[in-house]
Amino acid sequence: MAQRQYQSCMDACDACADACDFCVASCLQEENVNMMAQCIALDMDCGQLCRMAASYMARSSEFAVAVCQMCADVCDSCADECSKHPMAHCQECAQACRRCADECRRMAGIGQPVQGAGAGAQAH
C-alpha cells in the first residue's frame, strides 16, 4: 500500500521533526536566545510540517504530494538557517532537514531546487 511505498520518506519526516524539536529546545537554552530567533521559528515550522507530511502519506491523502513539495522547501530553509550556527544540535538538524527534503522531493517526483529560486519555482 502507499504507506509502505512512502515509508522512507515518512521515516525521514519523523526524524526531521524530532531533530527540529530538539533544536528548538536546545536553542532556547543558548546564552543569546535572540540570536537564535529565526532558527527557532523555522525549526517549529519545519517540525510541524514534517509531521503533517508523514500523516498525509500514512493515510494516502490526495494532497500528500503537494504537502511533501512544501515540506521540501521548508526543510531547505530550515537547513540553510541551522547550518549558519556552529552548535551540534543545529548542525544535526540541518542534516536531518536535508535528508527529509531529498526524500520529500523523491516522493513527490520533483528534482532538486534551483539555487536562488523561491518556493513554488520548481517544475512538477
Image (cartoon, helix red, strand yellow):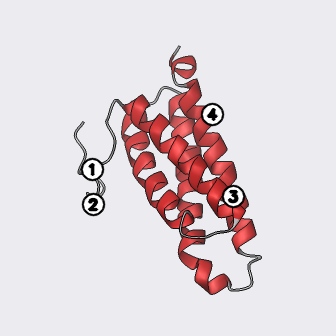
Q: CA distance from mark 1 to mark 2?
A: 6 Å
Q: Amino acid at mark 4?
A: Asp
Q: Amino acid at mark 2?
A: Gly
| Residue 11, numbered circle | 4
The residue at 31%/55% (across/down) is 119
| Above or below 101: residue 28 | below
Q: Is residue 66 left or right of residue 40?
A: left
Q: How far separated are the C-alphas under marks 2 and 3?
A: 27 Å
Q: Residue furthest top?
A: 1
Among the 4 quarters of the image, the one containing residue 112? top left
* Residue 120 location (% of width, % of height): 27, 51
Q: Are marks 1 and 2 in contact (CB under 8 Å)?
A: yes
Label 3: state its secondary structure: helix
Name the residue that disc number 3 marks: 21
Does 86 sit left or right of 45 as displayed? right
Residue name at image x 51 percent, y 47 percent:
98
